[in-house]
Every structure is written in C-alpha cells, then in structure tokens.
Image (tube, rainbow, N blue to C red):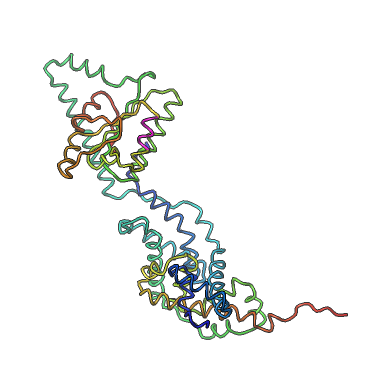
Amino acid sequence: MSYLKLFGKNREFVSKLENIRPRLFRLAYSWCHKRDLADDLVQETLTKAFKSEKQLKNIEQFDGWAFRILVNTWRNYLSRTKVMENIDDYVFTEEHTPETLHEQYQISSFVHSAIDTLSQGQRQVLTLIDLEGMSYAEVSDILDIPIGTVMSRICRSRKSLAGKLFQVSDNPEYNATLLRRVK
Amino acid sequence: MSDRFSDERLNAFIDNEIDLSEKQQIFEAFRRDEALRKRACELQKAHDLIKLTYQSVEPPESYNTPLRRQSPPWFMRSMAAGILIVVGSLLGWFSHQQMNAENKLPELAKAMQSAPVSNADAARKIMLHVSTNDEYRLNIMLEETEHLLKTSQQGGNKILVEILTNGSGLELVKKSGSPSALRLQALQKQYDNLYVTACAQAIKRVREKQGVDLELIPNTTVVRSSLSEVLERQREGWTYIRI
C-alpha cells in the first residue's frame, strides 16, 4: 500500500537531489574543467548529502546546503591531491600560436582559458553568482567568507575577465579584413 | 565623472544587490556618462558570458536516471516493527478477551457477525489515524485518500473512510485555513462517505495548555476518546492505518 511511502526516505529531499545534480555538475566542471573529475565530485557530494540529510534543518535552504557540500568536497580534493601547475603548460596556453588563436575565437574555450587564469576563490565566487544566481549573502555563507571578500572577489574577477575577453576586439588579427575584394 | 561609481558598486548593480534609490542614481548617471555605460556594459557582458558558457555544458547521460533509493534507516525499520508488534498484541488481547467471555458462544457469534464479510457488496472500511502535523505526511495521506475515494466511486465499490485526528494531528481539522485543512474540507464536500473525527481528550488538552477553544472545520465529529474509537472500529472490522 502506498501509505508505506511514509516510512521511506523523504521524497522531496530525493527529488531535490535529483534536480540539483546537473547544476552541481556544471558548477564542479566550471571549477576543474574536467568532466570525469566533475562527475566524481558530484557523486561524492550526493553520497555526503544522503548521509547528512538530518543536518538540513530547512528544506528551503537546500540549494545553498548542497553547494556548501560541493565546495567542501572540492576543497578536500585539492588538499588531498595537491594539484600543481606545470609552469611549461601554463606558458603554452598563453602563447599566441595559430592553433590557440583559432580555439580562442570559439567562445566557450575562450571563456574557459580566461577562467583558468583566475584563482580558485575568485572562480568559485564568480560561478556561484553568475551561473547559479546566488546572492552575495548566500555565497558568503556557502564559502564561509565575509561578504566584503565576496564583493572584492567578484569585482576583481569580473574586471580581469572583461579585460581578457574584450581585448580580443582590439586584437588587430581579430579585426583584420577576412575577405578582400580584388578588382 | 565615470569614477563616481566604483567597480564594486557597478557589480552590485549588475547582481541586483543595491537598493532602489541607488539604482536610480546609477541609471541617471548612465544617461550622461558614456564611459560609465561602457564600463557597466563590459562587466555585464562578462557576467552573461559565464552563464552562457557553462549552462550549455551537458551533464553525463547517467544523470537522467533516478537516484537509487536507500533503504529506510534502522530506527524507521524498528518503528515499523514496533507498530506491528503493538497491533498484533492488541488483536491478540481482544481475541483473548472474547474467548474468555462468560457467554462464550453468543459473544463469538456477535463478533463474527460484525467481522468483515468478504463478499463483493460489503463496503471496505478504512480508518486513518492522524497524529502528526507534518505537512509532507498529511499531503500524501490526503492524496491517497482522494485517489481511493475517486477510484472506488468510479468502480462502483462501496468504501467508508474515517480520518481520526488527535495530538498534533488536530492541526488538520483546525479552522486555520491551512492548505491541508482546506483540502480536507473540499474532499468532505465532494464525498459523503468520508468522515472526519477529532478526539475530545486532545481538544481538552489544547484548551488547558493554550487557554483557547479549538475551532474545528465543519462536519467534524468529536469522539469521546481516540483510543476507544480505534478499538471500536477495529472490532467492527475496519482496517486501521496510522499516519
């Protein structure tokens, strides 16, 4: 009998978890830019969320709560694996080779490489606000940082991003005439 | 001129984090200051590009399958087992009482007469005992009840449903305009085979505790005690479900 549902896990909680899955994936992906790693982070987040369902006092605050678990999972991953940046790779991505220039004109990879130059803290603030539409207060709560830090990080990261993204229009190669009529 | 508003203020403007009067000031400044407009526009574009880029990222296909359900936690399972033991003991106790009654045979005959008859014409009788005000549980209960009444009506089957409330469950019959109470009232109007009862003892306790008389939704019958109502209904062959 379906009254037995009452003894099962809270359905609302499970359906909210299912709905937030793609959003968690996009957010994780925007931080690490690796699909496999983003998937692993989401799986770990879901497992933690299932285990600590009782800690969620108000279901209205579900989104912030789930994002906070993802932030902690990502933080643990970083401290566990001690990600190192290879200085050679870094130089290569900044080089203006024909290949990289061509890729950069494709907008998504262009944004990716611009995001890659931001620090982890700036990246997290920027994606939580721009992608997830969280308020400054919510982000301050999720990342456990003062609201002033949220404001300065969003300001610095957007300015740096705007600088990188829109300098392309000043790039002479970008503005060069691609078709020339020859009489 | 364009420096009058810092980047922090412009970003807060884009993220809708400033109040209306400050917004008006910025709009006013936009009208006169082209450099400011350009700065705000670039920040806004950066904001839009982030959204555009990552929203088009498709999650893995496995994300379309529902999450595997976990089995209920141990305490829920032990609670369910506990309820089964209590119901079993009650049934055992009453059949024991009947067997030991002085007029054994007439009593037994009477009990059998009132026991459910398994022919197609007999009405199915279900008692739902509500002692919680958990909106989620109440919603499921009302949904299931509506479904039951509707399918029985459509299939021409006779059914009687009684919703008995006590303790926190009184919230359901309180004339407070809560969504569950309104839904129950609507169901009552629609089906005359749905009875709603409330425990007098529980109402009395609310009066003593809060000093106010509980106003109940119309057509709610007040029964002397929920326990005796449950026992009486079970003796009459009703199916008992505790919510």
- Up the image or down, B223 lies above or below A128; here it is above
User: Can residue B130 be seen here?
Assistant: yes
Percent from the top left, x then y, of residue B189? 38, 30
Query: Of all residues shown, which one is farthest toward the top?
Result: B106
User: Is residue A98 rendered to the left or right of residue B54?
Assistant: right
User: Is residue B101 rendered to the left or right of residue A27?
Assistant: left
User: Is residue A96 rendered to the left or right of residue A140?
Assistant: right
Which quadrant of the view contains residue B96? top left
- Up the image or down, A145 lies above or below B98; here it is below
Percent from the top left, x then y, of residue A64? 39, 63
What residue span does the magenta drawing correspond to? B183-189
Q: How many labels does the image show?
A: 0
Which quadrant of the view contains residue B217? top left
User: Can residue B230 be seen here?
Assistant: no
Overall secondary structure of the magenta section: helix
Residue pictured at 38% horizontal, 74% vertical: A80
Asked whether residue A64 is drawn in magenta, I would say no
Percent from the top left, x then y, of residue B75? 26, 49
Residue sitting nearer the eye, A125 or A137: A137
Residue pictured at 30% horizontal, 50% vertical: B73
Residue sitting nearer the eye, A118 or B186: B186
- Up the image or down, B23 lies above or below A91; here it is above
- Up the image or down, B120 lies above or below B21; here it is above
Residue pictured at 17% horizontal, 37% vertical: B204
Residue sitting nearer the eye, B230 or B99: B230
